[in-house]
Amino acid sequence: MLDDFLVRAALAAVGVALPAGLLGSFVVWRRMAYFGDATAHAAILGVALALMFELSVLWGVVAVALAMAAALHALEGQGREVNSALGVLAHGGLAAGLLAVALVPGGRVDLDAYLFGDVLTVTRGDLVVIWGGGALVAALLIWRWSALLTATLNPDLAAAAGIDARRETLLLVVLMALMVAVALKVVGALLITALLIIPAAAARGLTRTPEAMAGVAALIGGVAALGGLGLALRLDTPVGPSIVCVAASAYAAIALAGALRR
């Protein structure tokens, strides 16, 4: 019989991977990987501020991630300089977070748990947050699917149909911020973007429609989550990096199979 902590870890990993696959499809289509990096890196600052003011880490991360998302949304469409600004925000936010963690009173903070995740320590309360947040992300994506897809694939058609593309983009960056907060415990701030991008990129080579790609991305993410957890337990390696390595291996295998078929 499986230990209770392993069941919780598996449920947490899958609870993050499934909505990440759906959201990651839009991240890939819109080439928003750097947006995800900047938001995820800023999460460390949210952790530090929450610890300093004795608040819930979840709400600290959500607040800072949403602030970063708002800043990124404001930068969108500013031309070439946006890439430089994104780089400054991504790495500046991470550096500020690391400095703030060092200044947290009351002893040493387990930084590795926030950078790379610590899914084996997930509690039942964490599962409620993970599955609740993941369900909210998935529900909003499904609700706005048609508008989001039109604004992503054909902005001119979206404008003609009365769809506000900037509003849909704002929704995506807000969902990324929420996903960062939900996934922090599982894969950590440095690897969240990988969990968004890799399953979606792998699914692209197997599917022909956006809906199929999103569904397969969620499936690949879920399999990678369970496979990575099993690999980590067998090899005694960190779970977060193991999950990403399994996902990356799936991407490489799919890409190689596609190249051999040509």
Image (cartoon, helix red, strand yellow):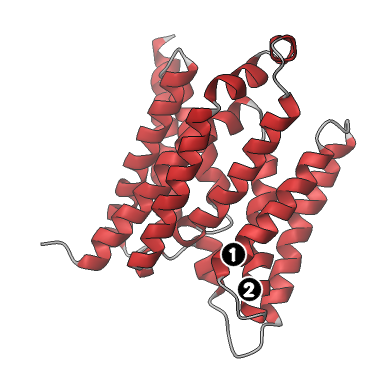
The quadrant of the image that shows the C terminus is: top left
- The image quadrant that residue 258 belongs to is top left
Residue that appears at 61% across and 81% down = 54
Picture coordinates of residue 20 (x, y %)? 48, 41
Question: Residue 37 location in percent, x, y?
Answer: 66, 48
Q: Disc 1 designates what residue?
A: 59
Q: Are marks 1 and 2 in contact (CB under 8 Å)?
A: yes
Q: Work out whether residue 236 or residue 98 is closer to the camera in this orientation and state it.
A: 98
Which numbered marker is on residue 166?
none
> What residue is shown at x 54% (from left), y 48% (from top)?
179
Q: Residue 85: horizontal and vertical position, in percent?
A: 84, 45
**The N terminus lies in which quarter of the figure?**
bottom left
Q: Measure the alpha-carbon separation of dots 1 and 2.
A: 8 Å
| In the image, residue 133 above or below residue 116 | above
Q: Which residue is mark 2?
A: 50
Query: Residue 261, relative to residue 101: is it above or below?
Result: above
Q: Would you place residue 182 above or below residue 18 in this image?
A: below
Residue 205 visible to an observer of this rendering? no
Is residue 45 in sight in this rendering? yes
What crowding class fits label 1: few (fewer than 14 Cα within 10 Å), some (14-19), or many (20 or more)? some
As drawn, 67 above or below 23: below
Residue 230 shown left or right of residue 238 in the figure: left
Q: Residue at x 52, y 32 (%)?
A: 141
Q: Mark 1: which secondary structure?
A: helix
Residue farthest to the left, as pictured: 1
